[in-house]
Image: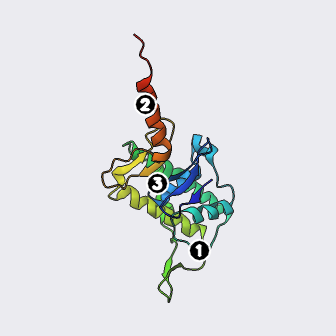
Amino acid sequence: MNERATETPGLRLTSYGGKVFRFDPGALCLELLTTGGPGEFARYEVLHEPADLVAWIARSRLPDGLDITVTEDELERVRTLRDAVFPLAADRAHGRPLQAADLDVVNAAAAGPPLVPRIEPDGTRAWAPGATGAHLLSTVARDAIDLFTGPYAHRVRECGAHNCYLLFVDTSRPGRRRWCAMEHCGNREKARAHRSRQAPRTP
């Protein structure tokens, strides 16, 4: 289960143990990675039908009020983009070369027209009508390009916990973020380290 955090940026995720925690990956494209992924991460898939993608949009960092129509084909294209962004983010996090095939997927998706914001007569922000899944696809792909080529590209990281693979961009001033969320993996790893220090040592 994910829910948009209303007070602070990020998503509300639920661990396998049933604990709800806030996770802010710092970028729209990285928020999409919480919906599943390639290979072993396919078991976390939540985008089974277009309505699932619309629900994710409502929880994402995109501004409210987007009236969007998503087709089955567009949903499949968004999943394909996600499955390319996932290894790109992991490669960035671990200092590996970016793979051409994944870059091709992102570049192709970014070539289409994105979602279009507009300003209303009362000065409020809104979305241009007629938004589609293809527009969302381009918007997410362009966000990924901005991230992987921008000033925080070297701060894309994987959670430091031994069994967590959530990816985020560390936008904190000191640049020392290690965990997906301190209230989740951070506390677990600190408790694990404490138990290790307290364990009796064998001669």
Q: Is residue 62 visible?
A: yes
Q: Which mark is residue 131?
A: 1
Circle 1 SS class: strand
Q: Upstream in the sequence, badge 2 or badge 1? A: 1
Residue that label 2 marks: 194
Compare marks 3 and 2 and give the one earlier in the sequence: 3
- Residue 83's spot in the image, x, y percent? 54, 50
Does residue 180 sit above or below 121 in this rendering? above
The residue at the far bottom in this view is: 121
Looking at numbered disc 3 in the image, what kind of residue is underneath it? Pro
Q: Position of residue 136 (x, y in %)?
A: 55, 67
Viewer can see residue 88: no
> What residue sits 61% from the left and 41% below the top?
17
Tell me the CA gap for discs 2 and 1: 51 Å
Secondary structure beneath label 3? loop
Q: Nearer the viewer, residue 64 or 139?
A: 64
* Residue, disc 3: 25
Q: Residue at x 54, y 62 (%)?
A: 60
